[in-house]
Image (cartoon, grey):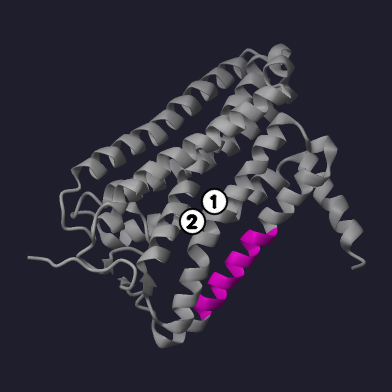
Amino acid sequence: MNSNISKATTLLTMESLNLPPSGIYPAFVFGTVAYCFILFCNTMLVITIALHSTLHKPMHIILFNLPINDMVGASAFFPQFISSILAQKRSISYPACFVQAMLIHLYGMGSLLILSVMAYDRYIAICCPLRYNSIMTNSNLVKIITIMWLIDFVMIAVLFALLTSFEICRTLIVDMYCNNPTLMKLICDDIRINNYYGLFLTAVAQGGSLVVVIYTYIQILLTCLFNKQSDAKSKAIQTCATHLVVFIFLEFNAFFTLIAHRFNSISPYMRKSFGVSVLIFPPLLNPLIYGLKTKEIRDKIIIFNKKMSPF
């Protein structure tokens, strides 16, 4: 019979990184540089949108939420990961693990919701251009963004509230970072309700966002096919294709990471690789894709850099 362990005082152990002595400092440098680059690029995107009134349009205001969300996800993962490399200790307290897991899930669901809202915005702009200004008003935009974040916080809060009533009887985190599946594996009691809600949340978050994105992009594609203006058609397709690649990458990796915990036959190395990629590549690439590839934002960043160059 497994005895319960105090959550407040127990240190949990994460799986070893298996780094050779010669790889410790290169891994530390890579992690530090990647994290600093993520913070710099996303902060630059946030500042650029915030400071320029010409960018205070629905598309850019929705986009404003993406770098903030990306910095939350990166900050939940990188500091603990980097410090564990340098200290060569893969231990973390249960409260810190709980907070890390909650922030990572807020980031994951937030990413899907933001990309879904961005897809809806592009759908209205391309398929209903004459009604765009009447639909995407400031009041409606505030409502959309507020509802988006409320859904994210409420659904993730319920997910982790269900964990608080259980005691733990194990101390091994079977992943590179803390998340809901690894925290549930610390519990020896009946957690069927947690499993059911987790499956429900996965279906709603990933299934719902997938339906929204597929519908909006089919409508956008049909509109572009019948659009005689070749420049407008190519610009719309290019913008939406980039958005679609980011969404598919996030959707597939997040889904595989969550489902892999439920099947012991799946390689743990694959699960870890896909799980870490969700926290590294979107925060790293999103500001480059949505910043440098968006002409209005790119021009403002260039002007801002020229002004700041003397300093």
Q: Is most of the magenta stretch helix, strand or loop?
A: helix
**Rendering coords of residue 152 (x, y %):** 48, 39
**Rendering coords of residue 133 (x, y %):** 74, 18
| Left or right relative to 99: residue 116 | right
Query: Which amino acid, mark 1?
Result: Pro
Hey, which quadrant is residue 270 in on the image?
bottom left
Residue 27 counted in the magenta span? yes
Q: Secondary structure at mark 1?
A: helix
Q: Which residue is mark 1?
A: 282
Residue at screen point 71% across, 21% down:
137
| Left or right relative to 243: residue 273 | left
Q: Which residue is mark 2?
A: 279
**Rendering coords of residue 44 (x, y %):** 73, 54
Is residue 222 placed above or below 6 in the rendered structure?
above
Is residue 272 placed above or below 141 in the rendered structure?
below
Q: Which quadrant would the C terminus be assigned to in this image?
A: bottom right
Q: Can I make out residue 118 in this image?
A: no
Task: For the residues labelled 1 and 2, say whether their Cβ atoms are less than 8 Å apart.
Answer: yes
Which range is magenta?
26-40
Cα gap from disc 1 to disc 2, whole angstroms: 7 Å
Residue at screen point 39% across, 64% down:
95
**Rendering coords of residue 184 (x, y %):** 26, 54
Query: Which amino acid, mark 2?
Result: Leu
Residue 241 counted in the magenta span? no
Is residue 43 placed above or below 217 in the rendered structure?
below
